[in-house]
Image (spheres, grey):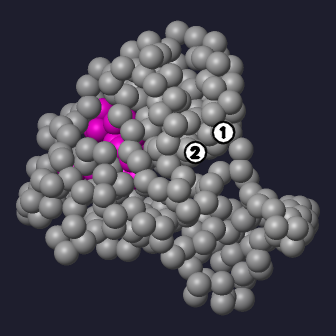
Amino acid sequence: MITVAALYHFTRFPDPAALRGPLLDLCTAEGVKGSLLLAREGINGTIAGSRQGIDAVLAHLRALPGCDALVHKESYAEAMPFGRMKVKLKREIVTMGQPDVDPVARVGSYVAPEDWNALISSPDVALIDTRNDYEFGIGTFEGAVDPDIRTFRDFPKWWEDHKDEYRGKRIAMFCTGGIRCEKSTNYLLGQGVNEVFHLKGGILKYLEDVPAEQSMWNGECYVFDGRVSVGHGLVPGDYDSCHACRRPISAEDKLRPEYERGACCHQCADEYSEADRARFRERQRQMDLAETRGEKHFAD
């Protein structure tokens, strides 16, 4: 059984580049795979490996400056959901494009998963999903507002365009693991919203802690690894991933005329050139060849 750990932590790294090499070396030595982002504002990512390997990497991360309180969320997979280990340097660990946003300074009020249903059932609360459109499309909370954004960068403009609709409302926001809400709640507080709440631990913690019979979640939750989606109890879901655009696709989506295995789905039919499609088809051919040899070839 593979242990999967999703994590993020906002802190101030004066020199994130100096942290990259030792972190990558440790992950490689422990057989841990996945993706971690380092920036001056902190660390974010998902990794997978043996129990021993994950524990070693988490211990290393918590020993970094300001990271002793780093919290992670665990789930499990039957097979390794990543093809390799990547540690990347970024301007932001989750890109919002708002230089004045600082989650280290302040964020909204955290709401535990067991208290979330009561909050979002209140008539004076507006519930906003901060994730991308394709994530909302496969699952969300009852009554949630869909900002219909392609990337998190689009959220501030959406709020500016719609803020008058939420005057006098308390605002509750949620995302996959909680990281987007660290920034979005700070942003709304800076915009003068007085009462802003966010789901502690994100959707993943809610699906782990809240029994299905008490849940207000509908559908599945998109995750950024080979599992594609998870349901209650964090069990792997029913979605696959389009290897062209990486968006989730269902069995029904594969029956649509736009779908071509490994090269196209209805969501990206108009987004790529024919040269891109040829590249995607070659990648799929290589994956098929690897499968015939009994090997695993990852699309990333």
Quadrant of residue 73 in the image?
top left
Callout 1: SS: loop
Task: Tell whether 7 sits left or right of 286.
Answer: left
Check contact, mark 1 vs mark 2: CB within 8 A.
yes
Q: Is residue 180 covered in magenta?
A: yes
Task: Tell whether 26 sits left or right of 62.
Answer: right
Residue wearing tag 2: 49
Circle on res. 104: none
Task: Tell whether 69 sits left or right of 222.
Answer: left
219 versus 98 height, above or below: below
* Residue 131 locus on image (x, y percent): 43, 54
Residue plotted at (18% across, 47% down): 112
| Residue 57 seen in this snapshot | yes
Q: Nearer the viewer, residue 187 or 70?
A: 70
Q: Nearer the viewer, residue 223 or 298?
A: 298
Report the amino acid beneath label 1: Gly
Residue plotted at (87% across, 73% down): 292
Residue plotted at (47% across, 16% down): 64
Q: Sequence order check: which comes first, mark 1 or mark 2?
A: 1
Q: CA distance from mark 1 to mark 2?
A: 6 Å
Circle on res. 31: 1
Q: Residues within 10 Å of mark 1 (few under 14, many from 20)?
A: some
Residue plotted at (60% across, 17% down): 19
What segment carries the magenta color?
171-188
